[in-house]
Image: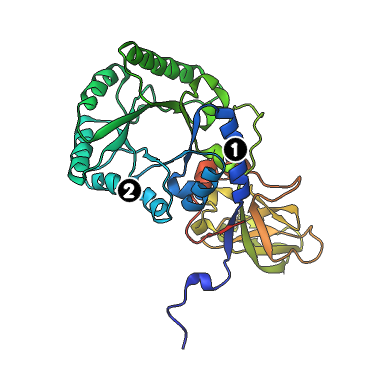
Amino acid sequence: MADATASPRTYPARTWAEVDLGRLRENTRALARVAAPARLMAVVKADGYGHGAVPAARAALEGGASALAVARPDEAIPLRDAGIEAPVLVFAPASPEEVDLYGRLHLTATVVGRDQAAALARAAREQGVRLAAHVKVDTGMGRLGFLPDEALAFWEELRGLEGLELEGLYTHFATADEPEAAYARLQWQRFRGLVDHLEARGVRPPLVHAANSAALLRMPEARLDLVRAGIALYGVRPPNTPPRTHLAPALTWKCRVSTVRTLPPGWGVSYGKEFVAWRPSRVATLAVGYADGYRRSSAHRAQVLLQGRRVPLIGRVTMDQVMVDVTELDGDPGSEAVLLGGTGPHAIEPEEVAAWMETIPYEVFTGLSARVERRYV
């Protein structure tokens, strides 16, 4: 009788992502050198952009990061469970159900409203702790935070709120990676004006920060006390940033070759019969599909690496499998295919995969499903 309790990982993975922690450390070191003397905060939200939050956090801290950031407080639980003690900033405002987590996990809160600040302070007093808090200023993102002309009064209110320790003030750029940086410059001027106004009133928050990955590489004036490195940490250079800093993608996505068959001319491939063999064609079926994060929009444009050579994806992407034309390959195409990454001149870059999927590298990485096993090298 079959063992119904066997773990799915008892068996070889059909598709997996290899994460090079050495590259992640080197990317962090390179970014920290650019940021210096500002500190570097490693953003490990969304399970470390799909790379694995705990391994990514450890590698970044080893590479010179001094703090971490997540989107939600529950994302910090695995970090603390793993024994990681570095400061962790939570970007999203705390809901009433989450405020207790901040004291229990020693998290730094982002404060965007009076009621939220009061709830955090009350929870801190009940737990007998002081919570570090960073005030978020909306300089033009239109998502979260106080408008610049509200921030000074709110800062003064918070200073008298027992239970909270005002540690930081920050904003977020909306267009730092766009070809035209005028709006990012306007946001910077608004934020810089607020900081100058606070300082004229004798207020200097310990940590003032604005730079994301793009601004870190493109806007040196915005580095301030701290920079928040996200996508660059994982080896993807934001668009329109100078190439001086060497970054290497840390993730390689692979899958198994299930079968190789020869199909006669006129034979259709995949749903909709959008591809029809025009010659005797060797077709390899790969064990990956849109349920793994390989999006349907990749059809008719994507390529994969087999034997170190690029071959085209043919037909529609299905839930669990895709097909590629290996007619031009000599002999056995091998047992595994590279979907993203690889080495040498034919390596498939994250930006290429994102273009095939009609999205951005962030979504490619974070869209890798739980069926894609993560392996660390």
Q: Is residue 166 above or below residue 23?
A: above
Please report the residue visible at 45 percent of the width from the left and 50 percent of the height from the top. 47
Q: Quadrant of residue 276?
A: bottom right
Extreme-front residue of the structure: 128
Residue type, mark 2 in image: Leu
Q: Secondary structure at mark 2?
A: helix
Q: Are marks 1 and 2 in contact (CB under 8 Å)?
A: no
Q: Position of residue 128 (x, y in %)?
A: 21, 43
Q: Position of residue 95 (x, y in %)?
A: 25, 42
Q: CA distance from mark 1 to mark 2?
A: 27 Å
Name the residue beneath numbered marker 1: 29
Q: Is residue 329 above or below residue 2?
A: above
Residue type, mark 1 in image: Arg
Extreme-right residue of the structure: 330
Asked whether the viewer can see residue 276, the reply is no
Q: Is residue 213 above or below residue 352?
A: above
Frontmost residue, 165 versus 315: 165
Please report the residue visible at 60 percent of the width from the left and 40 percent of the height from the top. 27
Colour treatment of the image: rainbow
Position of residue 276 in the picture relative to residue 73 (left or right):
right
Frontmost residue, 245 versus 162: 162
Extreme-bottom residue of the structure: 1
Q: The C terminus lies in which quarter of the figure?
A: bottom right
Q: Position of residue 64 (x, y in %)?
A: 54, 39
Q: Quadrant of residue 119?
A: top left
Mark 2 packing: few (<14 Cα in 10 Å), some, or many (20+)? some
Position of residue 107 in the picture relative to residue 369 (left or right):
left
Q: Which mark is residue 105?
A: 2
Please report the residue visible at 29 percent of the width from the left and 24 percent of the height from the top. 146
Q: Secondary structure at mark 1?
A: helix
Q: Quadrant of residue 256?
A: bottom right
Q: Position of residue 115 (x, y in %)?
A: 19, 33
